[in-house]
Amino acid sequence: MFNYKVTTVYFLQCYPRKKKLGHLLLINIQTVAGLPPRTGSDIDVQSLTNAFVNHLGFELYQGQPHIDLTHLEIQSMIQTYAKDKCHEDSSCSAVVLMSHGQSGGLIYGSNHAAITIKKDILDQFTNDAAPFLRGKPKLFFFQACR
């Protein structure tokens, strides 16, 4: 599905640092119209926040997880996050998106409209689309039942 190849090794610039290692965009779609609620996903949000913020040194983007966004709100949030100047002093970036999904790389917003992993998410993080993340590792985690 995805054709990416590793061309370089990147060493995270952790020490000395005055800022966080990177920013974490955490999106959890608990309720998708017409589908059963994703019971327990709030516990996943707490666990992921604890791991990334308290143990790995990330800062939660906009200070909070983003819950039950529509597909358009997810697209907008991804584009805003990818271009944000907050990444200028970061060593890397992380995106976690949890929702219901469908085969073919589709993930649902709360309104049951789908976005595509490649076009709507990954393609927003190219060097041209995300200039403050140019040359930096970008971590993506998708949890989407199909």
Image (spheres, rainbow, N blue to C red):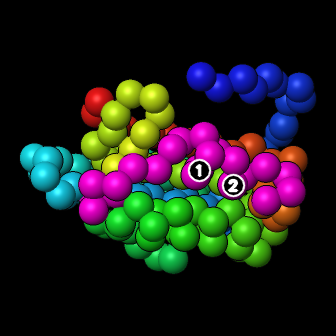
* Quarter of the image with the N terminus in it: top right
Three-letter code for the amino acid on which mark 1 is drawn: Ile
Residue 77 % position (x, y): 53, 69
Q: Which mark is residue 124?
A: 2
- Element under disc 1: helix
Residue 13 % position (x, y): 81, 50
Residue 107 % position (x, y): 39, 44
Q: Residue at x 51, y 44 (%)?
A: 116
Say which of 47 and 135 sits in front. 135
Q: Residue at x 35, y 66 (%)?
A: 70
- Evaluate if marks 2 and 1 touch, with contact meaning CB atoms under 8 Å apart: yes
- The answer to whether 58 is drawn above or below residue 137 in the figure is below
Residue 50 % position (x, y): 38, 55
* Quarter of the image with the C terminus in it: top left
Q: Residue at x 38, y 28 (%)?
A: 103
- The answer to whether 22 is drawn above or below residue 84 in the figure is above
Q: Is 108 colored magenta in this rendering?
A: no
Magenta stretch: give its range: 109-129
Q: Residues within 10 Å of mark 2 (few under 14, many from 20)?
A: some
Q: Which mark is residue 121?
A: 1
